[in-house]
Amino acid sequence: MKFQNRQFQNFDLEYFQSQFERTVEINLADSSVKCANVSDLLAGEDPRPLLELPLYYPEVNGTGLLRERIAALYPNASAANVLVTVGAAQANWMVCSTLLEQGDEVIVVSPGYRQVWGLAKNLGCHVKEAQLRPENNWRLDVNELESLASPRTKLISIVNPNNPTGSILSREEMARIVNLCRKTGAWLHADEVYRGTELNGNETPSFWGMYDRAICVNSMSKAYGLAGLRIGWAVAAPEMIEELWRRHEYAVIAASGPSMVLAEFALQPAKRQALLDRQKKFSREGHTVLENWVRAQEGRFSVSPAVATSIAFVQYHFDMPSTELADHIRRKVSVLVAPGSALGTEHHLRVAVGYEPQKIKTALVRIGGVAAELAGAAAVR
């Protein structure tokens, strides 16, 4: 069936993953660390609050205890500043559906997770992109961002630390972004799902508290390795939380009650730290394996030094579109990686490294073999 007179921007990254992630031997297209089991999360805990939980409708805006534990992660925030959502994806959708109208100007950063980019396009907005570049270690050029903004800018969307490059904004860069939003009157959407993945151990500060029109989004998926809970949240002024809540009621009514109880366990200070430590161990080991592999690839690949996240944005140095290369790797050696074009930058692959080192090594050996074959075929031609 075709719908007439309607242009719809697919979410290309998620579409690519959902088609193939269950049909390959090794999936490295994900953006989370190897996720924990329920038994890991409940270790040392009294499981009765979960086992005896009545399965009625839960609190629509999130359980009081969970909102309090989320608020404790942000300076001077309270439960009234928090709305619990079905993952960060739902929070991002609500921000766009609440704030944006056809013709609005939106600025995003590329490469990046293209959800806000696509949502804004589907709403008929004019989307501008501030481009990160590998020769600058994927750091944001705030001068470029400032040049894109205008009095018509309605929303500036930042992912910090960045997906897929792992780059982190400095405090000075964050302050300049806030000043830009204040100058133009734009809302600031800060997707902070990779806070806590910094490989040096210093947690990136949140944009929360820097600007009264900031909406900060996070989830249990990335830093905590609990993607299957599908628990996220938005932190904003109470008036904005009320606006988001009204959209939340239309979309999902509420997040899952059992998931919220498990998230309450996870955000206890000691348990939270254990989950972050677990994630960083996998990430550090995986990045080391990847960087060693890149050095052995005879110049076919390059990657910037990792500073955060359990993913790497790997550049390849031969002429093939990234979607075609990722699909060729999938069909040839049953490894799934994400094409850079689906994140806004060609000739790159996003590779998840937050798994056991042997799994990463096995996948990379297969990818290296494919690259060597392609290089050999090119030399013959």
Image: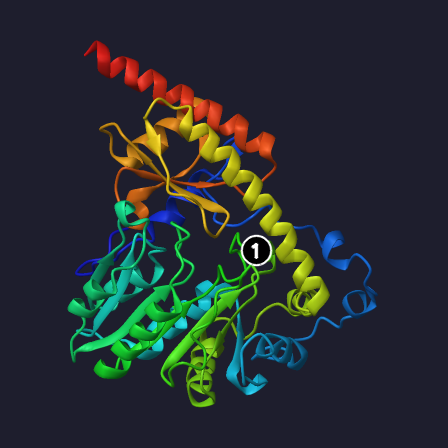
Q: Which residue is drawn at 57% across and 65% down?
A: 231
Query: What is the three-letter code of the residue carrying label 1?
Result: Ala
**Colour scheme of the picture:** rainbow
Q: Name the residue under label 1.
A: 227
Across and down, in percent, residue 216 comes to 44, 73
Q: Which residue is drawn at 49% across and 59% down?
A: 194
Query: 89 or 209: nearer the eye?
Result: 209
Query: 297 or 172: nearer the eye?
Result: 172
Q: What element carries label 1?
A: helix
Across and down, in percent, residue 279 comes to 60, 51
Q: In this view, does 276 lie to the left or right of 351?
A: right
Query: 205 or 10: nearer the eye?
Result: 205
Residue reaching furthest to the bottom = 239
Across and down, in percent, residue 119 comes to 31, 64
Does the image show residue 94? Answer: yes
Position of residue 218 relative to residue 341, above or below, is: below
Q: Is residue 129 left or right of residue 355?
A: left
Query: 222 or 142: nearer the eye?
Result: 142
Does the image show residue 23? Answer: no
Q: In which quarter of the image is residue 340?
A: top left
- The local crowd at label 1, few if under 14, some if 14 to 19, many if 20 or more residues have their Cα within 10 Å, is many
Position of residue 174 relative to residue 30, above or below, is: below
Quarter of the figure that contains the C terminus: top left
Q: Residue at x 47, y 49 (%)?
A: 31
Q: In which quarter of the image is residue 305?
A: top left
Position of residue 286 relative to residue 118, above or below, is: above
Query: How many dots with numbers?
Result: 1
Q: Quadrant of residue 323?
A: top left
Across and down, in percent, residue 303 comes to 37, 39
